[in-house]
């Protein structure tokens, strides 16, 4: 019985401490067009956090409208956003995105 309780406590503490995703304000744009990332071809969404750019998993560049729109497209503009997520294996795993500019 003690072992079952210890296993339960261990699993519970791991589940509670596993929430590494945090909200932060970052720059969001096209990794290739605006952040000079070259490890992928084409136009892909990326975030820049503290001067470091990471491709995004969990959102697509066209999820927010036309990526090539002359005013707000991610291939022509760097936009401020509030994101929740974390960097894993040099990629940003996004949980949520809120655009802060129009």
Image (cartoon, grey):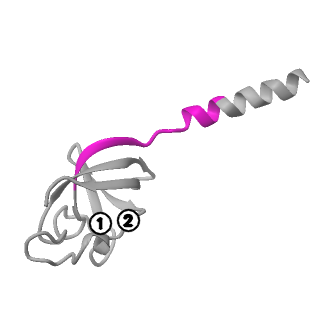
**Range of magenta residues:** 13-27
Asked if the stretch drawn in magenta spans residue 24, the answer is: yes
Q: Which mark is residue 45?
A: 1
Q: Which mark is residue 54?
A: none
Could you say whether the residue bearing mark 1 is in a helix, strand or loop?
A: strand
Circle nearer the N terminus (1, 2): 1
The answer to whether residue 49 is visible is yes
Q: Identify the residue shown where x is 29% and y is 42%.
A: 24
The answer to whether residue 91 is visible is no
Q: Are marks 1 and 2 in contact (CB under 8 Å)?
A: yes
Estimate the spatial distance between the alpha carbons at disc 1 and disc 2, rounded to whole Å: 7 Å
Left or right, 7 with reference to 101: right
* Mark toward the viewer: 1 or 2: 2
Could you say whether the residue bearing mark 2 is in a helix, strand or loop?
A: loop
Residue 9: percent from left, percent from top: 73, 26
Q: Which residue is mark 2?
A: 59
Residue 59 position by quadrant = bottom left
Q: Identify the residue shown where x is 67% and y is 32%.
A: 12
Q: Identify the residue shown where x is 28% and y is 61%.
A: 46
Left or right, 46 with reference to 76: right
Image quadrant for the C terminus? bottom left
Residue 45 position by quadrant = bottom left
């Amino acid at each position: 019985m003690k072992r079952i309780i210890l296993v339960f406590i261990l699993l519970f503490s791991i589940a509670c401490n596993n929430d590494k995703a945090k909200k932060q304000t970052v720059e969001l744009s096209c990794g290739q067009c605006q952040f000079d990332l070259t490890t992928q071809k084409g136009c892909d969404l990326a975030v820049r956090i503290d001067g470091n750019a990471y491709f995004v998993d969990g959102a697509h560049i066209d999820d927010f409208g036309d990526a090539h729109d002359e005013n707000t497209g991610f291939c022509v503009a760097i936009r401020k956003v509030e994101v929740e997520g974390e960097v894993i294996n040099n990629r940003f795993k996004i949980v949520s995105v809120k655009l802060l500019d129009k």
